[in-house]
Amino acid sequence: MIAVIADDITGAAEMAGIAHRFGLRVMLTTSYITGADTDVMVIATDTRSMTADEAVTETRRVAGLLASDPSVSRIFKKTDSALRGHVVDELEALINAIPHYNEALYIPANPSKGRVIRDGIYYIGPTPLHETDFSFDPEFPAVTSRLDERFPGHLERGVRFADATDTSDIDAALSSAPDTTLPAGAADLFTSFLRLNFPQAGQTDMALPDINLNDLLIVCGSTQSKAIDCGAVTSYMPVEVYDGLASGEEWAEAISPLYARTHSLILAMNHRHRTGHEAAVYLRSAMASAVASLMETHRPAELIIEGGATAFAILSSLGWNSFTITDQIAPGVIRMATSDGTHITMKPGSYPWGNLFPAASGA
């Protein structure tokens, strides 16, 4: 079994969707399951939303479970494709906790999406990372585009980087790495990793499932969110809730009559004046409490969530921790089902929706 450790749940879903398209048996979970009967188990740890010390503690805990599970043959560490998270701290913890590995190869680039590393500098299209909207990220603002500046001392801690201007660079770096190297990175690296380990597996096409756009709740919890035009009304988080002067439940109470009547609603944020870890934790908690309250009014056929930390908070508030992948709609846009049949579609905040909302800006 391949174990994938992801630091947020939309990243975990993205990895699960890729494995699903390879025809592999995939389990996505927020709690480790020892001896699971599956080809790929993707574990969403939510460590990106933790402090560095908390992230290391959780990573060590999961690594200990992996190291003691004989069914685990290989490990992949999913990281953000825009350098966010406690990357080197977690990789160092994994290397130290799992005897098989003595270094990590970190390639966060996704050349298939125009995200490349050239001469150690990360670009999105022609633009250095720190000149994009990622400079406004509330927890991990991009203040530099150089990997060695973002992660100083990485070599001493067992983490090496590689340039990647196209997918062949990733293939070459991965195939030349020894077995004792832990691969860590984004979707293109994981795709290469699966091709290397399952050379006979073929990828199926992505498809748009039959989604009921008249019975849904859409949650835009990312600072990268774009406007969505799907016929549903958008309710923006009131500034009183945003500033902590009112609760998510109060917001939900105000809009629940509309939601109960239409069964279709978009929740979003249009303020940006709060930054930092504490504010981010509060905002996703407020959004999660609003969603939980609304779903007491009406449980939609489709719950669609943008933003990994927000998705983890919402699913935790609803008590859902294990999912079956049903569709990969677009790169990073994954649809899955809970045990009670509710469908959940998730994507990272910086990815487009594909054809899910054809009229949406950024699709």
Image: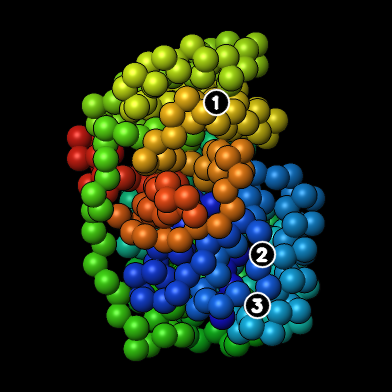
Q: Which residue is mark 3?
A: 35
- For badge 3, the amino acid type reads Gly
Q: What separation in Å lies between label 3 and label 2 (alpha carbons)?
A: 10 Å
Residue at 30% across / 80% down in the picture? 202
Residue identifier under label 1: 293
Cα distance between the residues tagged 1 and 2? 28 Å
Q: Quadrant of residue 184?
A: bottom right
Q: Nearer the viewer, residue 43 or 158?
A: 43
Q: Secondary structure at mark 3?
A: loop
Q: Please, which residue is most extreme toward the front here? A: 340
Kind of residue at disc 1: Ser
Query: Residue 26 appears at what percent x and percent y?
Result: 47, 70
Front-most of residues 257 and 51: 257
Sequence-first tag of 1 and 3: 3
Report the quarter where the C terminus lies. Answer: top left
Q: Which mark is residue 32?
A: 2
Q: Which mark is residue 238?
A: none
Left or right of 362 in this view: 272: right
Residue drawn at point x = 66 percent, y = 64 percent:
32
How many numbered marks appear? 3
* Label 1 vs 2, first from the N-terminus: 2
- Name the amino acid, label 2: Tyr
